[in-house]
Each structure stands twice: as C-alpha cells, then as structure tokens.
Amino acid sequence: MAELQLKDLYDGFRNPEVIQGFAKLINEESKKLFHPINIMEVCGGHTHSIMKFGLPQLLPENINFVHGPGCPVCIMPKERIDHAYILAELDDTILLTLGDMIKVPGSRGSLQDARAKGADVRFVYSPLDTLKIAQDNPDKKIIFFAIGFETTTPMTTSLIDIVLKRGIKNIYFHINHVTVPEVMVELIDSRDEHVDSYNNRIDAFLGPSHVSVITGSKIYEQFPRDYERPVVVAGFEPVDIMEAILMIVRQFNENRCELEVEYKRLVSYDGNIKAQALIDKYFEKASLFKWRGLGNVPESGYKLRPEFADIDAEKIYADILPREEIEDHKLCICGDILRGMAKPNECTIFGTACKPNTPLGSCMVSSEGACAAYYKYGNLLK
Amino acid sequence: MCLSIPSKVVEIDTERNVAIVDTMGVTREAGLELMEEGDVKIGDYVLLHIGFIMNKIDEEDALESLKVYNEILEKLDEEERRELVQEDDNCPNRGA
Ligand code: SF4
C-alpha cells in the first residue's frame, strides 16, 4: 500500500477479519490475566461502536466493558434543560442547540415540547450555522445553548471569536461545556468507595478519541501515575477499540501501568494548541458542574470569563433562571449506569416504559447513550 | 454527535477560511478556525467535527497501522492454513 486512500481510512479500521484477528490475540493474552479486568470506555462514541459492532461477545469472560458518562446529552441535568426551555419561551428569541439535545426531558418537558408550544427552538448541525440565522433575523435574540465535551468546546469558542470580531450584536451564549479528566477522577473515587458492594472497580480506561484530539493525551497522565489505572487512548473504529484492549491487557500481563495512545494518527501529546488557546481566551472553569446522575463534580465545567458577561445568557437572564436542584426520575438508574455500576438492561423500565421515542432518562435519548445503544443493538449482547 | 468520518481536502477558500472536503463521496464545507494558517493543504486527510476541521490525519501513522493489521491477517491466515493442512493430510492442496 503505497498511498493512503480515503477508503482505507474507513474500511481499514472496520475490517471484520482484523477485528477477529485482534479478538484471537486478546483471547490468548487474556489467559495469562491474574484477575478479570473492567475497562471503562469514558466516551459515548465508544459505547456506540462497542455495541454496534458487537464487541462484548468477541471478548473473553474475564474482560468486561463498563460504560462511562461520555455522552454530552446524557449528562445534561434537568436544571440546565429548564434554563434552555425558559430562554426559548422568551419573546423574539430563537434558541439554538446541537444534536439530540432537543429531545431530552427537563422538568418542564423537552425543547421539542417547547417548540410544539410555539417557542422557536432550532437544531443546528454546526455552531457556524448560528451566524446565518442571526443575520436572517436581525430583530431577534439568538441564544446558542452550547453543549459538549472538550471535543466541541473549541467550536463554541470559535463562534464567540467570530461574533465578537465581527461585532454581531444579537447572539448570546448559554455555556454547558464539561471536561473529561475531572469526571474520571470522580468516577474512580466513587467506585473505590463502593468497591465492596459493587465489587467491580474500574481497572483501566479506554481514553476518548476526539476529546484527546483537542486536549492531547497529556490530560490523562495523572491516571496511571496517581490512581494506578492504565489509560489507552483509542480511535472510534472497532479495530481501534480492539487494538486498544489488547494494549491494556498486555499492560496487565507485563505488570505495566502506563498512558498509551492507540489513536496516534490523530492524537498527539499536546493536542490542538490553537483550539486550547481559544478555549482559554473565552472560558474559565466553573467551580462545580452538576452532571445528570452523578451530581456536582468540582471543576468539571466551563463558563464564560467575566469580561464577556454581555454575551452570557446565564448572567443576562439570571433573575428568570431557577437555581434549585431537581431530582431525577425515581426508577431511572442512569446515575448508576453513568458511574459504571449498572448496565442498562438492569433498569426495571428499560425497553418498556423507557424507549428511545419515550425516554424517561437521558441515557435513552442520544444514540451515544448507553441505554439507547443497548436498545438498538441489544440483540448483540452475550 | 462525536462520530466523525475521515475526509479529504479538495479545495481551500482562504477568503472565507473554509476547506471544501470529500467525505465518502459527499462534498462538504468545514471551517479552518481551529487550524494554524497554511497548515491544511489540498489532498490532506482531516477529521471534521460539527462543521470544523479539528485535526489532520497523520498519513504515515495510518499506513503504519494498516500495515500492522495486514501482518496480523497474514499471520492468522498462515496459522489457519497450517491447522487446516494438519487436520486434512489427505488433501495436500488445501490451504495453498
Ligand atoms: S432505561 Fe431509561 S429509565 Fe432506565 S436507566 Fe436507562 S434512561 Fe433511565
């Protein structure tokens, strides 16, 4: 293979025979393991791939996936969705957001419900689409409800950068960006506390793909060093995931505990410096961010720096945005799922009262949510 | 939301700071705001995320991975062939 073709980048990392090849190597390697290992894939994109390609059934008994909290839609607490709902209902306002966010129920309903009641809520493919909508609606206030992990954060700050540089006056921001390492720490701590009752601690992490493209692998250094958890940053394709699992198992067998990168074709140690600088220019860490199902996690979210208060919808509308905490649905065990302590099919209303078109919890809403992935690909479970 | 398919850059519009890319036969536009100026060139493979190019794909590394995968396949084939031959001594042409 002399020259790389676009097709190779796609097919080469999905080749079923290569997946089988890795399955065989993993199976051989796993025979040497002293104890079973639980690997948490932090990222919802990985959860989706793992279920879609039926990877759990290719792995031996002593290697178990634990699905992590890495779906930006699933972790959005009702409080924040209510903010979006209230903002959307304002006169002469258009609320924009990404992806499946409009389907997630808050305490007043979802943004889709707000739309059905006449609010102007729109889904955009890219933050850049906001510019055109603002231009076409000069008399309206456009509020961008920004969501996502480190992957998506720089795209929001790029939009902010353009808005400020061009002096656009009718675009505002409600920031809900969250960060991965802080929640990984939270998960390790809470799992360690529960280790007796759950007896299934996280032994290693599959590091997120595209978060790491932006941040670089450096953000995970603390995990092997301070928490004795190996991290292997893996691409999204099934071959990437299988190769990363083999790398993790080899670390255990060779008595190593390291940070490794399988996804070298896109992830460097330092990451995308320009993107990081943009984030730093506009955002600072919020002291707490509440994650749906997990509660408040210190330093795990971003907010606009105080000097950008005049585009910060959360500040501008502070007097109409409630601050009280809201409980999640009683039967929903998303919290335990996001902590990696339960699997979706252990929820008593999974697939019955709670389905993708009638989601009661957030993990059922997005295709990256563990419950939705189990619902869609559940027949592939072992 | 985060699943991104690799794309190839077919055109660059410096004025609007966007790249025109081919994603599995579909042509799309992607913002260059997150890339250093001049870093992305026609023919480069890139990763897109919600309308922006988030990084270039390191071709050498991708090729290296694909080579390793091929070797795994070949090794697997060889082993399987040997197994087959051993199992089936009566048919020496098998697995050739
Ligand atoms: S199936 Fe529905 S209710 Fe149950 S944990 Fe998943 S999202 Fe929550």
Image (spheres, coloured by chain):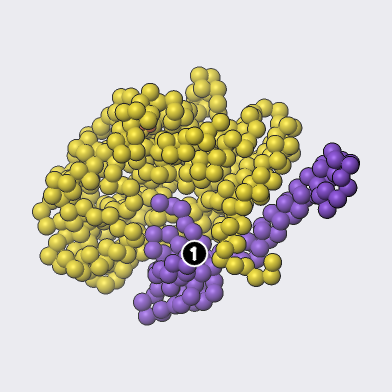
- Pointer 1: what residue? B24
Residue B52, image x, y percentages: 41, 64
* Left or right of A342 on screen, residue A170: left
Quadrant for ligand 1 reads top left
Q: Chain of mark 1?
A: B
Tell me the quarter of the picture where residue A224 sits. Answer: top right
Outermost front residue: B90
Q: Residues within 10 Å of mark 1 (few under 14, many from 20)?
A: few
* Left or right of A6 on screen, residue A145: left
- Figure check: A181 above or below A160: above
Q: Residue at x 25, y 33 (%)?
A: A325
Residue toward you, A38 or A345: A345
Residue A200, image x, y percentages: 55, 26
Residue A115 visible to the viewer: yes
Residue A131, image x, y percentages: 26, 66
| Colour assignment, chain B | purple
Q: Residue at x 27, y 63 (%)?
A: A130
Tell me the quarter of the picture where residue A20 sits. Answer: top right
* Left or right of A78 on screen, residue A249: right
Outermost bottom residue: B15
Q: Residue at x 13, y 49 (%)?
A: A118
Kind of residue sitting beneath label 1: Met
Outermost left residue: A91
| Colour assignment, chain A | yellow
Tell me the quarter of the picture where residue A164 sits. Answer: bottom left
Residue toward you, B94 or A305: B94
- Figure check: A163 above or below A113: below
Q: Residue at x 41, y 78 (%)?
A: B13
Residue A274 visible to the viewer: no
Residue A323, image x, y percentages: 22, 38
- Figure check: A175 above or below A41: below
* Left or right of A28 on screen, residue B40: left
